[in-house]
Amino acid sequence: MKLIYIIFIFIGVIVPFKGYAIDITAGVTAWYAWGSKQEYTKWNSIRGNNSCVYDPTFLYGPVIAVRLNDYFNLTFVYLYSKFSYKENVYKDIEDKFFVDSKVKRSDSDLALNYRLNNSFRVFAGAKYLSYEISSSFDDIYDGHCYSSSKHKSIGPGLGVSGTYPVTDNIFLLATLSGFYLFSTGEKFEDYGVYDDKYIDGPVNMTVGYNEYGINTNISAAYYITGFSTTINLGFRFQYFITDYSGYKYSYIDRIKNMFYGITLSATYTLGFD
């Protein structure tokens, strides 16, 4: 359903420009990223501020760009990944346990770009971010416990990008953007099993939050003239805060998230009159 909405947005923007020649660039992109998070909780004296480091993982997906005229172009990027991590939850030795979590992550950006000159563009658009997390752990009170959560947010983004030509077909590119996302609520479900018997839960809860942060990317692009193909190699850094502080029923105040790593993409350009 979300892809249908995105297609309609593309059509709605492209139609007013139908009198111009349009170039469409499409391809694939990948991001080999490392990541970490730091949780700040309302129960600091009991639970402490917990952090964990994610194993490196691939995020991958399609990338599409539509040049509408000499000044405007529309870009869409979607990244998806599956990864797992393990974290120590309680700082007290007596209550210490480890949580094993599996995550499905989606990260997409839709932006309308405006060319200021040959070197710089500004852009504005929408960002969508989602996580589906499944966790399990052994608790000394509740036995073996399971939890799951669905985390989805969407909101506006603004940024600037720059291009510097090194040769006729080699370019250096840099992008910096910020975003502020809203959610309809993060849905949690928790339950515990002790001696193979269902003893606790499920506890269903929805907690509101906002997210805000930055993206930055530095890369080098090589355009293969005879094949209308561009290869792009670079480095991307993403930092954002998940803020629960304005909402009830969450023991977490906020989470600081950081991802960084190598990007690689290949795109092909078609021209239409």
Image (cartoon, rainbow, N blue to C red):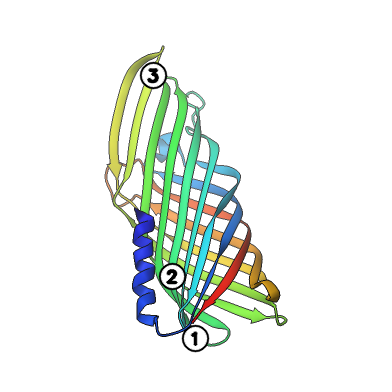
Compared to residue 98, the image places residue 273 above or below, namely: below
Q: Nearer the viewer, mark 2 or mark 3?
A: 2
- Viewer-proximal residue, 71 or 161? 71
The residue under the point 58% across, 59% down is 29
Pointer 1 local density, CA inside 10 Å: few below 14, some 14–19, many at least 20: few
Secondary-structure class at tag 3? strand
Residue 168, percent from left and from top: 71, 82
Q: Which residue is mark 1?
A: 70
Secondary-structure class at tag 2? strand
Secondary-structure class at tag 1? loop
- Viewer-proximal residue, 22 or 116? 22
Circle nearer the N terminus (2, 3): 2
- Viewer-proximal residue, 45 or 7? 7
Q: Which residue is mark 2?
A: 111
The residue under the point 39% across, 81% down is 17
Which amino acid is tagged 3? Val
How many marks can you see?
3
Pointer 2 local density, CA inside 10 Å: few below 14, some 14–19, many at least 20: many
Residue 207, percent from left and from top: 30, 44
Q: Which residue is mark 3?
A: 193
